[in-house]
Image (spheres, rainbow, N blue to C red):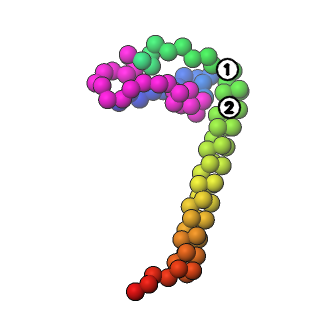
Amino acid sequence: MKILLVKEGFDIKFCYGALQKVKYEVGNHQRHWIAIFAKLNISIPSFKEQQKIADCLSSLDGLITTQNQKLDTLKQHKKGLMQQLFPAIE
């Protein structure tokens, strides 16, 4: 496990999002930081722009979470209706 620290002038949420897009195979035993991540060149916008991007992505994550909760609630409601409409025959 490698703990990464963000230097001043970099938004941690933006950097996290950028690292999420790195494609690598899990399963083989190697030092991923040295073998993959340390060699990457990532274009970094200004700090203000990083914050805007990170805030936008966080907002979308919140919307996705809310929609998933609504979907789960609707599925439970449907399940209840199905049990009422078609009770188990004994």
* SS type, badge 2: helix
- Quarter of the figure with the N terminus: top left
The residue labelled by disc 2 is 53
Q: At label 1, which amino acid type do we have?
A: Pro
Q: Residue at x 63, y 54 (%)?
A: 67
Q: Number of labelled discs?
A: 2
The residue under label 2 is which amino acid type?
Ile
Question: How far is disc 1 from disc 2 in space, using C-alphas?
Answer: 10 Å
Residue under the image location 50 percent in, 82 percent down: 87
Q: On the image, numbered disc 1 is attached to which residue?
A: 45
The region drawn magenta spans: 13-35
Q: Residue furthest bottom?
A: 90
User: What residue is shown at x 40% (from left), y 86% (from top)?
Assistant: 90
Q: Is residue 70 left or right of residue 2?
A: right
Query: Closer to the camera, 86 or 6?
Result: 86
User: Contact (CB < 8 A) between labels 1 and 2?
Assistant: yes
Dot 1 or dot 2: first in sequence order is 1
Is 58 contained in the magenta span?
no
